[in-house]
Image (tube, helix red, strand yellow):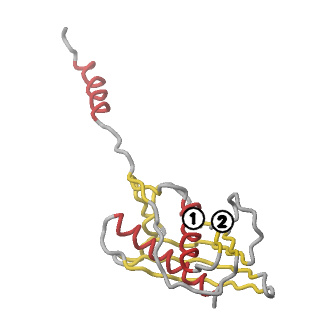
Amino acid sequence: MTLHRRDAAPLAALALLAACRSTEPALYTLLPVAGPQRRNGPRNVGVREVSLARYLDRVAIVRSVAEYRLAVSGNDWWGENLDTMMTRLLVENLAQRLPGSNVFATGGAISVTPEAIVEVNLQRLGQTGPETLAMTAQIAVTLREPRRREVARTEALTSPVAGAEMPAFVGAASAAAGQLADAVAAILAP
């Protein structure tokens, strides 16, 4: 069988496509970070689902925003939705910091009436330079007992990034989330 030049190009393209395999994405998760424990927190603390700035609401990890452009890691993905992961992480971090409190996500199966409600808007999460991660979050805490009190503020947090690889970024983001839990715990148990 003789192969003509006009037939060779499509066959070469097919061979090239067959040789190209998309690699599986690397999946990452944020992990709890231990912090100082506080006593005398509310008995039951409900954490509402963390709200995200829409540019962060994607599977691929956003590493930074510079000159109006997002730097997104193409094949480095969050292992779960970032809002769900941040909520779970905030619950875990707060439970460690408030050992006398029952801390739970309000969107889950638990239907206990909490004495305190925690709400967070995550506005920023990304590197501001090769060695610094920044997190900006609005916090609102409503304490129902012994008397109703509301506290709202914005936290601007930074964490060192110990390398250029994605695990260093995720570790720094976990540390910043721990700092966020420290700030919330200080409101709940001053």
Which residue is drawn at the image coordinates 58% and 76% (left, top)?
94
Spatial CA span between label 1 and label 2: 7 Å
Residue 155: which quarter of the image?
Answer: bottom right
Q: Which residue is mark 1?
A: 88
Q: What residue appears at the point 35 percent right and 41 percent down from the top-left corner? A: 22
Q: Residue furthest top?
A: 1
Q: Residue at x 65, y 84 (%)?
A: 41
Q: Mark 1, residues whose alpha carbon is within 10 Å: few (<14), some, or many (≥20)?
A: many
150 in relation to 171, above or below: below
* Residue 85 percent across, percent down from the top left: 54, 62
Question: What label does residue 3 carry, if any?
Answer: none
Q: In this view of the protein, which residue sits in the foreground, 61 or 79?
A: 79
Q: Residue at x 63, y 73 (%)?
A: 120
Depicted 70 relative to depicted 26: above or below: below
Question: In the rendered image, which residue does mark 2 sit on?
Answer: 105
How far across and how far down the image is residue 47, in percent? 66, 70
Q: Is residue 147 left or right of residue 26?
A: right
Classify 10 Å Cα crowding around label 2: few (below 14), some (14-19), many (20 and above). Answer: many
Residues at marks 1 and 2 touching, judged by CB atoms closer than 8 Å: yes
Point out the residue furthest to the left here: 2
